[in-house]
Image: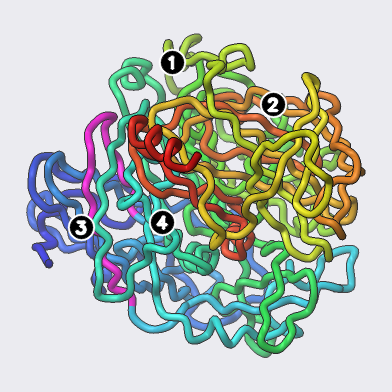
Amino acid sequence: MKHSRRSFLGMAGGTAVGAAVAGAGVYSLTGKSAEASETDGNTLVAGVNKTLDGVSSPQFTKLTPFKDPLRIPPTLRPGTGGIAEVDLVESDIRLHSQMPTTRLWTYAGYFPGPTIETRSKQSARIAWTNDLKGTMPVKAVWAHPDGPGPGLLPYNSPGSSGTIARPEIDKLTAWTAVHVHGGHQNALNDGAADFGVTPGNAQLAEYANDMAATHLFYHDHAMSVTSLNVQAGLMGHYIVRDDQEDQLHLPSGSYEIPLAIQDVNFDTDAQGRLNGQILAKRVPFTDPMPGMLPRSVATLSPFTMVNGVVWPYLDVKARAYRFRLLNISPTRSYRLVVVDEETGKVVRGAMKVIGTDLGLLGAPQTIDEALSLSPAERADIVIDFAAFRGRKLKIVNTIPGQTPGAALPDFLVPFPEVIQFRVGADKNDAYTLPAQLSGQFQKLTPADVPKDAVERFVVLTMDKAATMPQIWEMKEVSNDTELGKGIVQIAFPDGTKTLRRVAKVFEDTTSFFAASDTWEKWNIINIAPPNVPISHPIHIHLMNFQVVNRRAIDSSGMDYDVEGTKTPVTIGDAVPVAPEESGWKDTITVNANTIVTVAGQLAQQTGRVMYHCHLLDHEDEGMMRPFVVMPPAINEIHDMQME
């Protein structure tokens, strides 16, 4: 089903933010092969973003930070009662002016895809048409796990020299499933990993948007290739607005900017010059064996893109700006710090957090030094540049105890740069953040969780060889249960619980069934060996939650050979919850050897959805499980039948 492209009203490409016409009808954003916008009155046809000039062949072995302007995607506002049509197309887009253009898979020719903007409680219908041709544009390789370290390990350097080829990736054609992360949509519309579509077919989806104002995002979610598809370019921002937010008069228009942060690597030619091709260099726990794929430790890359530009700059006025931060990296977590380039010092208190994954906080919270984001986490922040007229500030990635802005090769962060802000010299009106943001926000405590909330247990751990991260779905059983394979005991303050593993891979029988619009309490326990202290960001579909408890654990009683505990895991000291994770969430970082308890209410939507690790390599390799949400009366019948 094709419709006129001229029914889309908005800005295409460039650094402007556009709008789509409201009302019934079909709004098409196809982006097919047009290199510039075609105008028809106020109507613009989406085309490939060509804002960056640059080299046409490989010439540079290094990239210059802050050389190119930030790219801001166009905005699509789907009308009520109509269908917005977005084609997935291949595009050549420049990611840095010192590299040739990069072949990408995109939404409508843009990377990131168009920012979809909706109103709360106004549903949107979108037809995502897979019109991708040819094979995967990303070059995928394995790095040898025993690199020369410490220092700049081979998997965190440009180029594929010395790596192990992945011929199974070279022949991949496009299989896509679009997921609006954090959104409320029935399972048929959720972009389930096993609901992918092939070229020439469309995914038709309806999004309820029945939530408070927030910053979601959309990305590909296809089984086994999510990481590669996202690295290939398939992601975009999704913003929900409401009347309450409008009344706060937060920075808006050109002073509100979504920022997708993503680490990236590039291949090189024979002379070591960067050729622009995205390189997915996974680090396996062990070298690949013929006919077998090893499990991935991580995909960590040396460069950082913001909205698809490596180390961009943004010209800002000396006034307050609102930035909607998103970490869309496959694996890398960021610890972001604002630095004054003139002094080299951290600008403490520069970032004010006003919202988390799923909406506004009750009041702004000041970041003393650093703001941390794991993959899929968002932070809604305000930075006021009024005191920095004519100066340059930058956001850098850092680690505790390290001088911000210094190179961090020993910690796999060879280049700390993220984005530079060039502040204008003109004086602007002063801005004061509202002292109160969301009047409906309430910080949950354990006492606030309804006593009839369904309690669940999930264990994140490794296999017996410590080479495969796993997600274990657990069921509480009698404490008299004999210890052994798949049995984990945890000594909670109010008594020991014995848990039996009922599933550990996606294909195992579904065992979590839930009633829509009811409260749930999930205990997520990360039992990690001392030599593999991996943190996992866990995303639960269709559930808005808050952290109600986070504590360290002593997991020395875990016997990996038995895949169970020989003595109970014990609960230790409380672990702080940072301002950027203190509100409503859909993804939470579970650090090694901690237990995180989250609680919240399931959405009204129903069906078979998922929860999983959002380290995309881990998700692709099995750290994902389905669960089924049903209307309460149906769930009650199901429970009776299962007894």
Quadrant position of the N terminus in the picture: bottom left
Q: Rate crowding at label 1 as few (under 14), some (14 to 19) or many (20 or more) other CA atoms within 10 Å.
A: some
Three-letter amino acid code of the residue under disc 2? Val
Mark seen at residue 438: 1
Three-letter amino acid code of the residue under disc 1? Ser
Q: Is residue 457 visible?
A: yes
Give x and y (percent) for residue 84. 19, 52
Q: Earlier in the sequence, mark 2 or mark 4?
A: 4
* Side of 39 relative to 516 (left or right): left
Q: Residue at x 59, y 30 (%)?
A: 455
322 lies above or below 200: above
**Label 2, label 1: how far apart the Cα atoms are:** 20 Å
Name the residue nearer the viewer: 154 or 63. 154
Q: Which residue is mark 2?
A: 577
**Label 2, label 4: how far apart the Cα atoms are:** 30 Å
Residue range in magenta is 114-132
Q: Which residue is mark 4?
A: 192
**Label 3, label 4: how far apart the Cα atoms are:** 20 Å
Q: Rate crowding at label 2 as few (under 14), some (14 to 19) or many (20 or more) other CA atoms within 10 Å.
A: few
**Label 2, label 3: how far apart the Cα atoms are:** 40 Å
336 lies above or below 65: above
Image quarter of residue 421: top right
* Side of 515 relative to 382 (left or right): left
Name the residue nearer the viewer: 243 or 82. 82
Q: Is residue 408 visible?
A: no
- Nearer the viewer's eye, disc 1 or disc 4? 4
**Label 1, label 4: how far apart the Cα atoms are:** 32 Å
Name the residue nearer the viewer: 398 or 117. 117
Please, what secondary structure does the residue beneath circle 4 have?
loop
Q: Earlier in the sequence, mark 2 or mark 3?
A: 3
